[in-house]
Amino acid sequence: MPESRRHFAGRVNRALDDDRLQGALIHAMTGLRSRRDAAFKNFDFAAGRADLKDRRRANLERLPELVEAFAERLEAVGGKAHYAKSAAEAREIVGQICWNAAGGQQRPVVTKVKSMAGEEIELNPYLESLGMEVVETDLGERMVQLTHTHPSHIIAPAIHLTKEDAARVFGTEPTVEAIQAFARESLRQKFISAAVGISGANMAIAETGTIVLVTNEGNADLTTTLPPVHIAVFGIDKVVASLDDAVAMLRMLPRSGTGQVFSFMSSEVSSEKPQGLMVERIAEMARDVKARGLKLLWVLGPAVVHTGSVDAFCALVRSRNTAVTIFFLLAVM
């Protein structure tokens, strides 16, 4: 049932009168704004925004074509594209895939990465109603899930909660270190035993049939690599034409979103071995990052870690014969 204006106004007034909530919001947003300003000191924000605007307009004009190209590229390497016309249809598709993947488990574990599309279609309660254990793996989303609230910010979903709130939920001391330690310990077995991992997508690249996830915790990588089945839930507006578009987005997204020159984890998830153009685009992005004074740690698949040069990493990618290669770029300031 749609919320009435009177009810909405009442919620707004209660939130404005909540000193603890206002304190949490002011503390978080003030810091975010200062970091964002610092990140754009040596980067032309207006030019970057204009470039992305032009790319977005060009992509929107051919969106049906790009969506079809993404689906064809994905399915050519063993993936499957599903289309849903409504939230209910999307929930049913995801639910059926999860049950098929569970293989008769009584209460299969489904791990999730932060997904605004998943939140909008109310995916969690639907899967739980089917008897599944749904586990949010983003720390903020986990706090929101266990406090039975809703995300309050697209980047920082638990911005309305304090570390004292988290400590009460997790049963720990009210320190960041204690909360993070508890999260790692409690989530580790969930990652390992999950039948399905669900993520959103920051971008879906039509040129390669891959999705891009931009995170800072690494939980996306565990969610998309450890379970036997990975589902990405996203709107068609996330589809971009090329890796060049994705690189342009990655130059702006972390700066604007979290005040970082580059996010700690930018993961490109693919169902095939990366080929020529993809490898070269990844190399281009990596050189751009290194030129900004950041260190690189490459992870190829779930087991191979590489700390050498960009060229050496590209040679390593080309030399592998595996049909399923997922590689990540970690940039540490």
Image (spheres, helix red, strand yellow):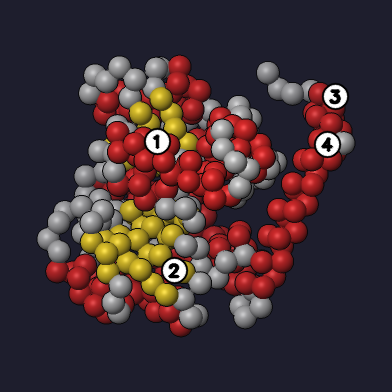
Q: What SS does tag 3 mark?
A: helix
Q: Position of residue 280 (x, y in %)?
A: 30, 74
**Of marks 3 and 1, the one in the foreground:** 1
Please determine whether, in this image, residue 192 is positioned above or below residue 332. Answer: above
| Gap between marks 3 and 1 measured at Cα | 37 Å
Mark toward the viewer: 1 or 4: 4
Marked residue nearer the N-terminal end (4 or 3): 3
Of the residues under marks 3 and 2, which one precedes in the sequence?
A: 3
Q: Is residue 257 left or right of residue 134?
A: right
Residue 120 is labelled as none
Q: Residue furthest front?
A: 173
Q: Are marks 2 and 1 in contact (CB under 8 Å)?
A: no
Gap between marks 1 and 4, in whole Å?
33 Å
Q: Position of residue 33 (x, y in %)?
A: 71, 62
Question: Between marks 3 and 2, how big is the CA–CA gap?
Answer: 47 Å
Q: Name the N-terminal-most of marks 1 and 4.
A: 4
User: Is residue 179 something that shows in the picture?
Assistant: yes
**Residue 330: percent from left, percent from top:** 40, 65
Q: Which amino acid is tagged 3?
A: Arg
Disc 1 residue type (three-letter) = Thr
Label drawn at residue 331? 2
118 vs 211, left or right, is right
The residue located at (29%, 43%) in the rendering is 226
Q: Quadrant of residue 135?
A: top left
Q: Nearer the viewer, mark 4 or mark 3?
A: 4
Residue named by callout 4: 18
Which residue carries the number 1 mark? 111
State the mark number for residue 6: 3
Residue occupying the point 24% across, 77% down = 312
Give the amino acid at mark 4: Asp
- Where residue 281 sits: x, y (%)? 35, 71
Q: Amino acid at mark 2?
A: Ala
